[in-house]
Amino acid sequence: MRADEFSAPLPGVSFVMPVLNERAYLEHAIASVLAQDVDAPTELVLALGPSTDGTTELARRLAATDDRIRLVDNPAAHIPVGLNAAIRASRYGTIVRVDAHSELSPGYAALALQTLERTGSANVGGVMHAEGRTPFQKAVARLYNSPVGLGGGAYHGSSQEGEAESAYLGVMRRDVLDEVGLFDESIRRGEDWELNLRIRQAGHKVWFDPDLSVTYWPRESWLRLARQFRATGAWRGELVRRFGRRNGIRYFAPPALVVVVALAVVIGVLQLTGVLSGVASLIASILVYVPLALYLLLVIGVALAPGGGSVRQRAWTLLVLPTMHISWGLGFLGGVLRGARDTVDASRLGTRNTPLP
């Protein structure tokens, strides 16, 4: 994407938000954006996917009540396509990515603008603070906020400010986006990581500020969570195919768990049928069953640890934690071996009539 393909942006802040089947969350997300107090003109550009739950109608009603809300179509329903459509339609020099499943904390935009200026960075992000309403969603949120659940990325709870590999959502300089190009529309998950890689390769800084906080609402059911993590893992595997070890080592832990589980099943069958016995069986048991036993103890320990919530929430943790790891790991292995191809995150598809991206 060439810089001369864009008109010169005006001073101000453009919030951009891709939206698909988010009726239960959209109004709160929009309210948190419109409540941001910055000393500059602002707008919110919604990229509307083919929702079937009334989200589009709600967005149109909200836009009719506030001229800061602008709408663009995203018929493909891909997140990077929607983000790019919203950015191209935006008018201002600072782009703030917002997720319809999230809510910005008061003062978020003003502080981010200060951090951009203070650090000279091209992109600034903060902490993704997950919250839940039901016992299941609260269990998921707790694991999102824990390094055990999502692998310890800075935006999952670090308190150390500084340069970062990527940024959650991101508050970005439009001129840098024009320079390096927008989101890669061939990547359906992990598109932010890839964009930040290009930003850093171009010599710009990506910055993490722990004082910036965004409330994120996780998926509401086990099946939706498993679908989300499988798709995310598949696209991380695709990114490994494309960019190799530029991906952090932490991404390889869930697929390693899947491999160990698969080996345990094979070894168990061989032992039960008598094919594997004696010293070989003992060595295989130590190499495979001991790591699995340690992982099981980790899951139980996380569920029973202080702050685990109600009995129902702790019970959900016993299922949610391995679901996150195994779903992600299965997706990752598929993505590495054959590519992500047309893998989509189906976790936000409301009905079978919703067109798949």
Image (spheres, rainbow, N blue to C red):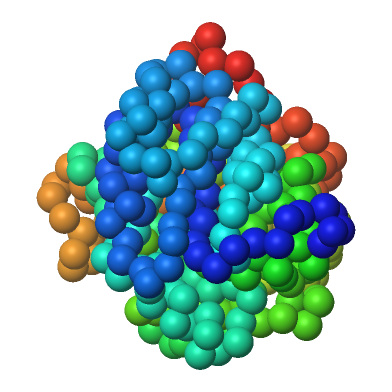
Q: Quadrant of residue 211?
A: bottom left
Residue shown at the point (34%, 40%) measured from the top left: 66
Reply above or below: 82 against 38: above
Image quadrant where one finds the C terminus: top right
Image quadrant where one finds the N terminus: bottom right
Residue shown at the point (59%, 54%) measured from the top left: 91
Q: Is residue 275 visible?
A: yes
In the rendered image, the residue lying farthest to the left is 310
x and y percentages locating residue 336 in the rendered image: 79, 49
Residue shown at the point (51%, 44%) measured from the top left: 45
Residue shown at the point (55%, 21%) measured from the top left: 50
Q: Quadrant of residue 148?
A: bottom left
Reply above or below: 24 against 244: above
Asked if residue 105 lies left or right of residue 312, the reply is right
Residue placed most toward the observer, 69 or 179? 69
Reply above or below: 345 against 251: above
Reply above or below: 204 against 149: below
- For the image, the number of numbered tags is 0
Asked if residue 161 lies left or right of residue 342, the reply is left
In the rendered image, the residue lying farthest to the top is 353
Residue placed most toward the observer, 148 or 273? 148
x and y percentages locating residue 101 in the rendered image: 39, 44
x and y percentages locating residue 310 in the rendered image: 13, 50
Residue placed most toward the observer, 225 or 284? 225
Q: Quadrant of residue 298?
A: bottom left
Q: Is residue 329 visible?
A: no
Asked if residue 340 lies left or right of residue 304, the reply is right
